[in-house]
Image (tube, helix red, strand yellow):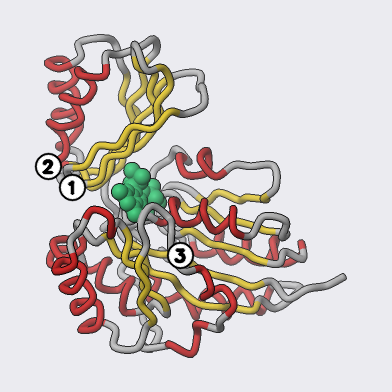
Amino acid sequence: MSVNTKLYVLTGFLGSGKTTVLLELLKQLKGHKIGVIQNEFGKLGIDGTILRNDDIQMVEINRGSIFCSCLKLNFVNALAEMSKQDFEYLFVESSGWGDPSNVNEILEAARVVSDKEYDFKGVLCFVDAVNFLEQVKDEETTYRQLKHCHLAIITKTDLADEEQIQKVTQQIRDINPVCEILISANGQMDYSFLRKDLTIYQWAESEETTNSVENKPKSIFLEYNGTVEKSKLDRFLQSLTPDAYRVKGFCRLEKEGWTQIDVVEALIDYKPSEEFEKSQLVFISKIGPAIIKKIFSSWQECVGTEMTLKN
Ligand SMILES: Nc1nc2c(ncn2[C@@H]2O[C@H](COP(=O)(O)OP(=O)(O)OP(=O)(O)O)[C@@H](O)[C@H]2O)c(=O)[nH]1
């Protein structure tokens, strides 16, 4: 039987909580036929590993933004390929650096080459209640993601007080006066938006994306074998927080075993994880290739064991 696949595009700055809500959405929709297109910025598909599950079908597009000319054809092809599968829902998680200003142009291209039309339900933009007000001052991407969304989801409201949430809401309204706004804490939120057509909350006209190969932040990944003491790794990660937009990966710790590491600004989060062959951490640099030297010297000082850095 042929069904109309409901299509949602998830956007939001690095570490704003897209994967956290997507995992919850997948739980809420258990039993439905679901596809995911996962776009990671670095070479390693960390989110893909977190989301992988027998019930969903996933395609990963890594090493850049799906809105950038470097990857948008891959995105169009993935949409066309997945349109053959009669999913009930298709979620596209774009990378935190993704500027979705040209999303309509891409969906139009996909419409031309796909077997079936998607029922596009809207762009969801994740807004980090703790870090957004600072990010939006410096990062055009954060502004564009909001301008072109239909639903803004304020995340991490468990970590922000009422006054902060009010300020964030006001700033969202200044950028996008018509989008719907919801709040979320650790993926808990009102999911009834799934029954709505969010595209009625369209604000901005399509425009060129700001994503390009030239302005793509540097990403680098670190690997080590064996184990590391948590306190040492923590000191290492803390020393790098001013210079990295985001650090994430899976590490084997001496006492705690395999652990998922998430660093967003000053916040370092540790969660138990499945096992891997070796420990790997992806760094998305605020300071370009200069981060390489800092990673080397800080690792020497704080941890001191063998590791390798890869592009
Ligand atoms: N306390 C709290 N932490 C959250 C919330 N949402 C996300 N986080 C944490 O924030 C970090 C980043 O969350 P992700 O869901 O991976 O963010 P993301 O937008 O997918 O990240 P990128 O794909 O790297 O851009 C993780 O440590 C999450 O556990 C929330 O509502 N409350």
Please tell me which residue lies in front, 145 or 210: 145
Q: Which mark is residue 286?
A: 1
Q: Residue 84 location in percent, x, y?
A: 76, 64
Quarter placement of the N terminus: bottom right
Q: In the rendered image, is residue 99 in sight?
A: no
Dot 3 amino acid type: Leu
Horizontal placement of 78 versus 287: left or right? right
Residue 191 image offset from top left, x and y in percent:
51, 68
Q: Viewer-nearest of labels 2 and 1? A: 2
Give the amino acid at mark 2.
Pro
* Label 1 residue SS: loop
Residue that carries the numbered disc 3 in the rendered image: 10
- Which residue is label 2 attached to? 242
Give the Cα distance between marks 2 and 1.
Answer: 8 Å
Spot occupied by residue 46 in the image (x, y as percentages of width and height):
45, 39
Name the spot of residue 277 as percent of width and height, x first.
50, 18
Give the residue at the far right of this rendering.
Answer: 1
Q: How many other residues sit within 10 Å of disc 2, few (<14), some (14-19) or many (≥20)?
A: some
Sequence-earlier tag: 1 or 3: 3
Quadrant of the rendered image containing residue 117: bottom right
What amino acid type should be assigned to the residue bearing mark 1? Lys
Q: Tell me which residue sits at (25%, 9%) in the image.
A: 305
- Look at the numbered disc 3 and give the secondary structure of its residue: strand
Horizontal side of residue 51 vs 270, given as left or right: right
Q: Secondary structure at mark 2?
A: helix
Q: Image quarter for residue 161?
A: bottom left
Q: Are marks 2 and 3 in contact (CB under 8 Å)?
A: no
